[in-house]
Amino acid sequence: MVTLVRAVFLAFFFLQLAVEAGLLLLHLRKAGRERGVPPTLQGHVPPETAERSRAYTLAKGRHALISMAASSAVTLAALFSGVLPWLDRVLAGLGLGGANLFAGYLVVLGLASALLGTPLSLYGTFVLEARFGFNRMTPRLWVADQLKGLALSGAIGIPVLYATYALMRFTGSLWWLWLFGFLTAFQVAMLWAYPVLIMPRFNRFEPLPEGPLRDRLVALSEGAGFQHRGLFVMDASRRSAHSNALFAGLFRPRIILFDTLVQRMAVDEAASVLAHEIGHYRRHHVQRTLVVSLLGLLAILAALSRALPWPPLYAAFGFAGPSLHAALALLALGGGAFAFWLAPLAAFFSRRHEYEADRYAVRLARAPEALKSALLRLSTESLGNMHPHPWYSAWHYSHPALVERLAAIDRAATT
């Protein structure tokens, strides 16, 4: 049975690796061959921008391939080298047991994972992004962000680990339902706390100044009957030249505009972006996505409750027997191999939500050309890929490809 468990895991693991790597290679091959501006974007995108976009796509894709190979190697080494049961013995030998062993074991694994991922993360920020003019992060700011993130992860994550242990250990056979209720409440609480308590630790937020842009956005929100907690500008330019806008919160969100977006977009363009975001809330996309993610969490916990007491699962990876922390470590390291096929489903529904929000924005702002101009600006300034491989985009893209999205806006404007 132990051999069968290992064989099944490796079959799914290498299937995932083959699919992900194959799609990425197809994506890179298409980017390498396709040159110039797509016909429908002729006159809107300079040829030199299209070439920089192609180079950026290739650079990011190669970096993703290396990251995929490194991550796969680390995962296999962690699962089959004996390091996981060795760490268990080391921590137990230091006198840790019960909740302390549970939390300590998972904290050490989390820190090790973050440390191993640091070199590629640094390369992506300070070499790849800098090469294309996007990175504005300084080494000092990067270190400060890491320290803040570590402190917040400890302050929030460690109590959650202790609560998780208590629920798994002391609530009987239905522990997974108790844990699901706790994690649901935690996620909802974090949706409130993130913009109020956490984001301000990393960025400065100031009210959008008085002027034509604020007047237009306020009028747009009021016209849609959209209740929010204020319009804020975030100093995103301290870290990156990329532009964006987002809502933070679940029911009455804060409207957050990157300072790069405020600086570059015309009033009608910014208004169309806001109308798009209002569309997400009017169509309850945030709530629906949360419900789907919680149902996924419930399914994972139900499956974990079945696997938790099964000795062959642990023996297959070198553990002497079942334990709560070993179960969660195996889930974190190997669970993705059994659920990777859900990625295209999630991407499909996300793209559908984007189309719905675009249609809402066309009706609300009544400026389809401004929405198209805004999307074109966001894509070209971020060097978005203009020639994505259809299989890769279907599997991975949470937003429709630019050409398809602009065509959909034209259709919405004429109906």
Image: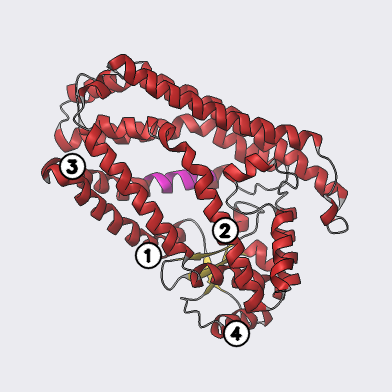
Task: State the residue position of label 3.
Answer: 168
> Dot 3 surroundings within 10 Å: few (below 14), some, or many (20 or more)?
some
Residue 329 vertical position relative to residue 149 in the rendered view, above or below: above
First of labels 1, 4 by sequence position: 1
Q: Residue at x 31, y 32 (%)?
A: 329
Q: Position of residue 177 (x, y in %)?
A: 21, 50
Q: Is residue 147 magenta?
A: yes
First of labels 3, 1 by sequence position: 3
Q: CA distance from mark 1 to mark 4?
A: 25 Å
Quick check: can you spot residue 16?
yes
Give the mark toward the camera: 2 or 3: 2
Q: CA distance from mark 4 to mark 3?
A: 50 Å
Q: Is residue 178 left or right of residue 78?
A: left
Q: CA distance from mark 3 to mark 1?
A: 26 Å
For residue 219, the mark is 4
Task: State the residue position of label 2.
Answer: 352
**Magenta residues?**
142-150
For badge 4, the amino acid type reads Ala
For badge 2, the amino acid type reads Arg
**Quadrant hosting residue 209:** bottom right
For badge 3, the amino acid type reads Met
For residue 159, the mark is none
